[in-house]
Amino acid sequence: MESSGWKCIEYFQDILERELQLQHGVGFTVQRVHFGGATEKTAGYMSLMHRVSIDIEVGPMRQLRTLCYIVKEKSETVFGGDLVDVLAVFPKERSVYEMLLPTLESLWSAQRVRFGPKMLKATECDQFTVIVMEDLNGSGYCMRDQSFNLPLADVKNVLSKMAQFHAASVVYRAKGGGISEHFKKGVFSEDTVGLLSSYHEALYSAFLESMQKRHFPAKYLNPLVKY
């Protein structure tokens, strides 16, 4: 994998020190750093998704530990192209992970409710733009490898999380909380019509294919196919 400004142990040094919280005089030694893909494919993602694994030895006993992180990297090679900048994708994501989610979670602090991964570091410069987040795999989180028949227990969990998020957002707004200026412009606007049109055909075809695989009734499918 090509090296870039963030793909070095020095970039993660401050993150490791905060994560380990070692006592004064106790150090650690990095044994191995691996940069790999965090997703099977990039289609549909508006950034490159990397998983970074760092093997370290801690203290005089040389205790072995592995710390993992997810890095979202801005790239011209992924879905979206110019839309990434027009829609201010990275500034929006940084605002959400850095400010909004921690604030909403603080309203549920007694219940320890979480709405997303912690943001550990973000850099935007001429050479690269990245957001470093915790790897939720470490806490047992995993993506469902299926598109059909979501278990009822999972449906209830999703609805419960949405209700908690909504309740926190209501309290946040009632207390005068605001949002980034970037969110005041929607996805569909005069600035995005031309850019979005180039993706319409492929997305529409994928949408129809998905409905057909799920055996939607003809009364819903036929009008869409004719369109």
Image: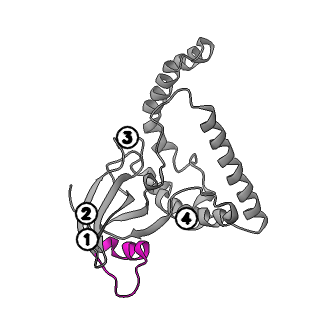
Few, some or many residues within 10 Å of mark 2 (<14, 14–19, 20+):
some
Q: Secondary structure at mark 4?
A: helix
How much space separates mark 1 and mark 2, taking CA atoms?
8 Å
Q: Which residue is mark 2?
A: 33
Mark closest to the chain's N terminus, 3 or 2: 2
Residue 158 vs 208, above or below: the answer is below
Identify the disc placed on residue 95. 4
Residue 80 falls inside the magenta stretch: no
Q: Are marks 1 and 2 in contact (CB under 8 Å)?
A: yes
Q: Earlier in the sequence, mark 4 or mark 1?
A: 1
For marks 4 and 1, give the CA distance.
31 Å
Extreme right residue here?
174
Q: Which residues are magenta?
A: 11-28
Q: Of helix, strand and loop, which one carries label 1?
A: strand
- Indicate which disc residue 43 carries: 3
Asked if residue 64 is positioned above or below residue 152 in the image, the reply reads below
Q: Nearer the viewer, mark 4 or mark 2?
A: 2
- Magenta highlight on residue 25: yes
User: Which structural element holds mark 2?
Assistant: strand
On residue 30, which mark appears? Answer: 1
- Distance from the alpha carbon under mark 4 to that under mark 2: 29 Å
Q: CA distance from mark 1 to mark 3?
A: 33 Å
